[in-house]
Image: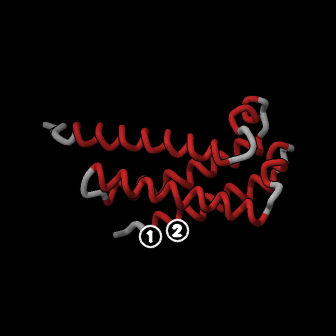
């Protein structure tokens, strides 16, 4: 017989993760000068690559935070740390490319690929650093 005694904890961690992802997206979408969702709806692949890379870059350390968490609160705290790191990655890329938003709005793939790759790299390092 298979036990589902861990189901309440699973539901709690999934709910916390979805909530943190929603908070991350709200913060990220507010931090950028361009409107990713409108651009994606207009079939701007550059915006989709940038946002997708950022989302994956955030969920990598979030998954490690869930795996290593001692409690839901621990998971949320480390999820917020991951959020801060990922937003910092975005601003570092903006330092390198001050016209990043204009390039993404214009559909320039090089800018979005740099942002996506930086987001993924930041997420990987962030996740590896969470092996507390």
- Residues 23 and 125: in front is 23
Q: Quadrant of residue 65?
A: bottom left
Q: What percent of the width, then of the height, locates residue 33?
A: 74, 46
Q: Which mark is residue 129?
A: 1
Q: Secondary structure at mark 1?
A: helix
Q: Residue at x 54, y 61 (%)?
A: 85
Q: What percent of the width, then of the height, locates residue 82?
A: 48, 58
Q: Residue at x 40, y 44 (%)?
A: 17
| Residue that badge 2 annotates | 125
Left or right: 17 as drawn, with respect to 107: left
Q: Residue at x 73, y 35 (%)?
A: 40
Q: CA distance from mark 1 to mark 2?
A: 6 Å
Q: Does residue 38 sit above or below 28 in this rendering?
A: above
- Answer yes or no: do the residues labelled 1 and 2 have beta carbons within 8 Å? yes
Q: Does residue 111 sit above or below 34 in this rendering?
A: below
Q: Does residue 3 sit above or below 73 in this rendering?
A: above
Quarter of the N terminus within the rendering: top left
Q: Secondary structure at mark 2?
A: helix
Q: Quadrant of residue 88?
A: bottom right
Q: Does residue 45 sit above or below 74 in this rendering?
A: above
In the picture as drawn, the residue positioned furthest to the left comes out as 1
Q: What percent of the width, then of the height, locates residue 34?
A: 75, 42
Q: Residue at x 62, y 61 (%)?
A: 89
- Residues 62 and 76: in front is 76
């Amino acid at each position: 017989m298979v036990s589902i005694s861990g189901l309440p904890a699973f539901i709690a961690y999934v709910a916390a993760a979805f909530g943190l992802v929603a908070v991350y997206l709200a913060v990220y979408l507010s931090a950028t000068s361009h409107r990713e969702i409108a651009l994606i709806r207009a079939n701007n692949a550059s915006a989709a690559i940038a946002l997708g890379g950022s989302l994956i870059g955030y969920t990598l350390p979030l998954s490690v935070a869930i795996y290593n968490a001692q409690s839901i609160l621990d998971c949320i705290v480390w999820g917020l740390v991951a959020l801060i790191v990922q937003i910092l990655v975005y601003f570092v890329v903006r330092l390198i490319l001050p016209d990043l938003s204009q390039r993404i709005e214009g559909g320039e793939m090089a800018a979005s690929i740099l942002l996506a790759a930086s987001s993924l790299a930041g997420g990987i390092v962030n996740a590896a650093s969470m092996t507390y």
